[in-house]
Each structure stands twice: as C-alpha cells, then as structure tokens.
Amino acid sequence: MGDQELARELSGRGITDRRVLEAMASLDRQRFVPASERALATSDQPLPIGHGQTISQPYIVGFMSQALQVQPGERILEIGTGSGYQAAVLARMGAEVYSIEIVPELAAQARERLAELGLEGIHLRQGDGTLGWKEAAPFDAMVLTAAPPRVPETLLEQVRVGGRLLAPVGDRDDLQQLILVRRTPEGGAVERLLSVRFVPMTRQAPRLC
C-alpha cells in the first residue's frame, strides 16, 4: 500500500503538484530501503541504502519532482538511480525515465525492485552518469541525485533547448545549492532554489566555465 499519510504531510509543506503527491502516495517507501531501515521509511529523513549512498528524504524528492515540472510523456534522464525511488515517482507521473547508477550492486537491486513493482517506462543503465546517455538524447529534462561541484557540460548538452536540468551543486556538503538550469541556445539560465545536502557525484566530467 502506498504512503498516503506521507503525501498528506508533504502537501502541507508546499508540495502542491497533485501528480507529485499522487505518485508518492502510490508508492511504498519501505520497498526502497534496506530491511534495517524500514521502521523509519515513512519519516521525512534520508536513509542509508548501502555503499555510502542514501535515499533522499521524501520532502526533497517531492520538491525536486515538483520543481522539474514534469509533463506526461516527457523523456527524463536521472543521474544516480540509487534505490530507484525518484525514478519510480517520475514514472508514476507519466514520464519516460532513463536512469544511470554507477554502483553495480545498487543498479542491480533497483532493476529488480522496479521490475517487481511492475513499473513501466523506466530504462536503467549501470555506468558513469557524468557521461549521460548520448544515444537517447536529447532529453526534455534531467535530474541529478548526487552533487557535482558544477554542472557537467556533457550533461547539459544532452538536454534539449528549452528543457530543464535540476541538480545539487557544491564542493562541500554544507554549501550545496539545488539549481534549476533552463537550456538556452547560448547555454543555460540558472535559478537557485534551495540549500541541500547530497552525497558527492562520483567521477566528474568536464565542467562548465
């Protein structure tokens, strides 16, 4: 059963997109965390999922899903599959999701978990997310769930002009900003949204100047 109570809590904290709330209510967060963490699955906090990675707190997942302004049928690239929870939310919102995870064990677990849930429209790849998914580009939107010091240029180039890229950026976990980049013919227009704390992105690609 999905987490209805959690969705109601988020609706009182500024997550107002009905499709985001319905997507999160339809998913059981317990299915996305290790057995040792399931008692805390409905709490609004990040939880460890192994290999030095975490599942983001529900508020951040809701905030990011809302900020991305997902429309049904859009093609979205996610960098950092992790548990698969963010990909599942986006898929339930009607997006076609391409997701890359660098940790082989997490990629395998997410693939099995999402298959068990019967979620369609999610394409998974194990590999270096900083390289993106060139053969599937351009994407309508992109979301990073780990923090690079700056947005890798290789990723922004895979977003269509007019598309969006959402990412936490910063050299230190106490100085990260969640930014929304709207791709323009000249590059990107940046909007700073929220102070956040994410695990650092592994293996950096070339950066924007």
Image: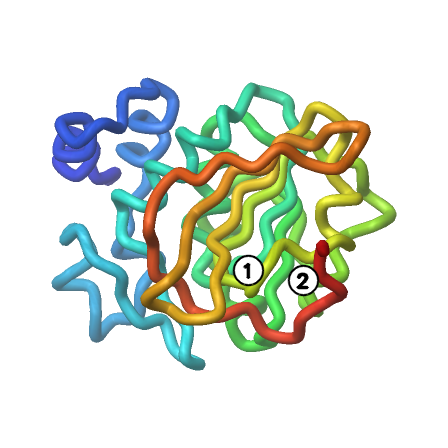
The type of residue carrying mark 1 is Gly
Helix, strand or loop status at disc 2: helix
Residue 167's spot in the image, x, y percent? 52, 49
Are the residues at dot 2 and dot 1 in contact (C-beta closer than 8 Å)?
yes
Q: What residue does disc 1 label? A: 80
Q: Residue at x 78, y 43 (%)?
A: 158
Q: What residue does disc 2 label? A: 129
Q: Residue at x 44, y 61 (%)?
A: 83
Left or right, residue 83 beside residue 131? left
**Taking 167 as reference, is 129 above or below it?**
below
Rate crowding at label 2 as few (under 14), some (14 to 19) or many (20 or more) other CA atoms within 10 Å.
many
49 or 170, nearer to the observer: 170
Q: Residue at x 56, y 63 (%)?
A: 148
Between disc 2 and disc 1, whose residue precedes?
1
177 or 26, nearer to the observer: 177
Residue 24's spot in the image, x, y percent? 32, 36
Q: Is residue 9 visible?
A: yes
The type of residue carrying mark 2 is Gly
Helix, strand or loop status at disc 1: loop
**Taking 194 as reference, is 141 above or below it?**
above
Q: Compute the Cα span from label 2 to label 1.
A: 7 Å
Residue 202's spot in the image, x, y percent? 59, 74
Q: Is residue 121 visible?
A: no
